[in-house]
Image: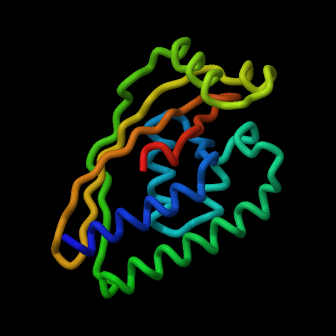
């Protein structure tokens, strides 16, 4: 159980670093949630940054952010491997939209994020997705779930708040 909890703690550290990133380029909010989780556990910063909507970058340099994120992911995964002797895995058990009231969610986004009017108007739809995972280390399992606030921009789905669900 300790090793699984250590894995969860490392994920929390990752989430603190990734306070404004999100995932996108997927055809549905469920797809983008799975894409984000898979990229994280594969230590794929390019996969994560490929998913970051421009409106979430807040003027930051995309390449620099990706490099910093890759460094952090490498440290996190190395630590998880060391703590579990490389004997760990994850599985995505369930992904579902739990709230698809776009108008209300877009109002929440307006209140929560400091977006320019044109960026806010670029959001076509919004949904909340819950993703359930099982983390396993050394034969011990821990189930956990995360909620993602997803938005559709130009036909692609993105995650606006990955840090809040960790």
- Where, quadrant-wise, is the N terminus in this rendering? bottom left
Q: Residue at x 49, y 73 (%)?
A: 76
Residue in front for this viewpoint, 31 or 41: 41
In this picture, residue 47 sits left or right of residue 149: right
* Above or below, comparing residue 69 to residue 130 in the picture: below
In this picture, residue 75 sits left or right of residue 121: left
In this picture, residue 89 sits left or right of residue 38: left
* Above or below, comparing residue 63 to residue 99 in the picture: below
Q: Residue at x 63, y 74 (%)?
A: 71
Where does residue 26 sit, x and y in percent of width and height?
56, 40
Q: Residue at x 70, y 41 (%)?
A: 56
Residue in front for this viewpoint, 34 or 148: 148
Residue in front for this viewpoint, 114 or 143: 114
Where does residue 36 sit, x and y in percent of width and height?
51, 51
Q: State the scheme by which the image is colored.
A: rainbow
Q: Quadrant of residue 61?
A: bottom right
Where does residue 32 sit, x and y in percent of width and height?
51, 43
Residue in front for this viewpoint, 103 or 93: 103
């Amino acid at each position: 159980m300790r090793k699984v909890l250590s894995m969860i703690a490392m994920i929390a550290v990752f989430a603190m670093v990734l306070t404004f990133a999100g995932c996108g380029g997927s055809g549905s909010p469920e797809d983008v949630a799975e894409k984000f989780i898979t990229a994280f556990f594969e230590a794929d910063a390019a996969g994560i940054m490929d998913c970051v909507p421009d409106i979430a970058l807040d003027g930051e340099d995309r390449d620099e952010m990706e490099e910093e994120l890759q460094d952090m992911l490498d440290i996190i995964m190395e630590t998880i491997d060391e703590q579990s002797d490389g004997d760990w895995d994850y599985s995505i058990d369930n992904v579902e939209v739990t709230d698809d009231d776009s108008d209300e969610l877009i109002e929440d986004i307006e209140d929560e994020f400091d977006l320019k009017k044109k960026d806010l108007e670029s959001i076509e739809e919004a949904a909340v997705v819950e993703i359930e995972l099982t983390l396993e280390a050394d034969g011990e399992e821990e189930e956990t779930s995360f909620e993602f606030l997803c938005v559709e921009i130009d036909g692609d789905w993105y995650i606006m708040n990955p840090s809040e669900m960790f």
